[in-house]
Every structure is written in structure tokens, then in C-alpha cells.
Image (tube, rainbow, N blue to C red):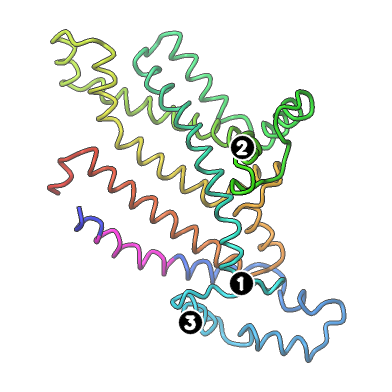
Amino acid sequence: MLRIIANRMLVAVPTLILVSMLIFGLQKLLPGDPVMAMAGEDQDPQLIATLRVKYHLDQPVPTQYALWMRDVAHGDLGASLRTEVPVRSLIAQKLPVTIQLAIMAMILAIGIGIPAGVISAASRGGPLDYAANIFALSGMSIPNFWLGIMLIFIVSVRWHLLPSSGYVSPGEDFWLSIKTMLMPAFVLGAALGAQLMRHTRSAMLGVLRTDYIRTARAKGLLRGAVVVKHAFRNALIPIVTVLALLFGELLAGAVLTEQVFTIPGFGKLVVDAVFNRDYPVVQGVVLVTALAFIVVNLCADVLYILLNPRLRRS
């Protein structure tokens, strides 16, 4: 297991370097000049020259990238061009919000998608299968922003059951924080649960057709035991892969959902930074997001080994 983890870590280093190069290079294609926006309406030439020197924007792009990577290697992601707040501080403020939303959404997605997928595969062609597929198609077809607006109108405005927007830290008021994040988590969880249901159903159908499942049924084992104990366990590896990808997407930030519910997470942070030409914030957020993807996929690889002992010998 340690050898597999070490190999994944070796792959992670060039991946992060490639991502950093793409981040730094592509954002230079964005229209507009951040220095001109920082200089204000007067746009004093001396101030513009000073700002370019301060943020190394007077240097060639390769030199700018080398200077940025040098700082990143020392744990310095730079400071916001707009507010001069360190990017590390901004990430430390926004990341817990996104992690909380991602965890709650994944709990709802797993609670909805996996049981629905297992039941759908076990009763293929039956009423439950059709009902689960209708749920999946609806979850993938309904736009998140529309579902969020409808929930705010019905649950908050009409029924007064949950807060309509905003964010409260769990440290301030745990239950109010859960209530505030429940609707956005449901909006994301319903869409992810629909995807998870389809993948779970596909994985289960593949396993249910195998010879050892037919043998287990021929031995007279209960149908529930065959489905849950034998089929579901062997279908977990592709499901874990999907879970890792979906969780990585959530950590990248759910932009529309965060905008609808006014949640100060990663999605809102990076969108505001792009519109403001705040390069250090964009670079820092995307780099941390890429690192989160790598960590999540590393955890998925470890789960593969735990779920399938045959992989330990590979």
C-alpha cells in the first residue's frame, strides 16, 4: 500500500506543476489590465509604474511565473491585488464553508443515490426501477439555480421553515449553521444523487450478471444477502471513483448554488476574483482546488485497496 501511495505522490508533483503553468498562462489571456483598475480614475503614470514593479508585472511572463512558484514553494500564495489581503487568509476563510457544504451535499447524495441505484438494479424492469430512473433524469435535468429559487420561495418565504440565504459558522451556532446550509446542500445533493444513482445501477447490473452471483443464488441464499453482501461490495470500486470525482467538484466550488443562497464559499471567491482581474486569488484558489482533487483521489486509491485485497499484491 505504501508503494502505491508513494507512486501516486510522485505523479502528483508534475501534475501540480502542469496545473500551475496552465493557471498562470491562461489567466494572462483574460481581457483587461488589473493595474489600470487598481490605479483608479486618475490613472497616474507614476502610480501605474510603481504598481507594475511591486507586483512584478513589468517582468516577462516566464519570470513572473518563476517568481510566483518560488513564493508558492515557501508557502506564500501572494496577496489580493484589490484588498491586499493574503490569499492564504482568504482561502482559510472560504475553504471551511465549501467543505461544510460539500460534506452535507455528499451525505444527502449518498443517502439518496446509492440505495436508489441498488434497488433499481435489483428490481430491473420493475416499477421501482422506473421510479428510480425518473428520479435520476429529473435530478440531472432540473437546473440547480431554479431548484434553489423554488426552495427559497416555498420553504423559506411561504412556510418559514429554514433561512433563505446567508451563512453561519458551526462555531457560532451549530444548529443554525445546519439549517442555513440544508437547502443548498439538498440542491447539490439531489443533482449528485441522481448521477450517483445511475453509476450505482450500472455497476450493480454488471456485477449481478457474473457467474459467482448466479452460483450464490443457486445455493439458495436470500436475495437480499446476495444483493447487499456479495453484489454491492464488489460494485463499490467504480462507485468510490464517482464519489471521489463528485466530491472534488464540490470542493472546487458550486458557483450557481453559492450565488443563489449567498454563501461565501470558494465558488463565489473565484468568480469575484476573475471579474476583478485579481490574479493572485485566482491562482491560489485553483491551485488549492487541484491539490484537493489529488488528495481526494489518493484517498480513493487507498479505499480501492481496502475494498479489494487483490490490489495489495499489484
Q: Residue furthest front?
A: 172
Boundaries of the magenta span: 6-18
| Picture coordinates of residue 199, whole percent (x, y) | 40, 31
Q: Which is nearer the N-term, disc 2 or disc 3?
A: 3
The secondary element bearing badge 2 is classed as helix
Q: Which is nearer the N-term, disc 2 or disc 1?
A: 1
Specify whether residue 8 is painted magenta: yes
Q: Is residue 230 above or below residue 278?
A: above
Instruction: Give yes or no for contact between labels 2 and 1 (Cβ–Cβ under 8 Å).
Output: no
Count how many numbered circles sit on residues in the image: 3
Instruction: Provide the major secondary structure of the magenta segment.
Output: helix
Kindly identify which residue carries mark 2: 175
Kindly identify which residue carries mark 1: 86
Position of residue 5 in the picture relative to residue 243 (left or right) = left
| Picture coordinates of residue 63, whole percent (x, y) | 52, 85
Camera-near label (1 vs 3) is 1
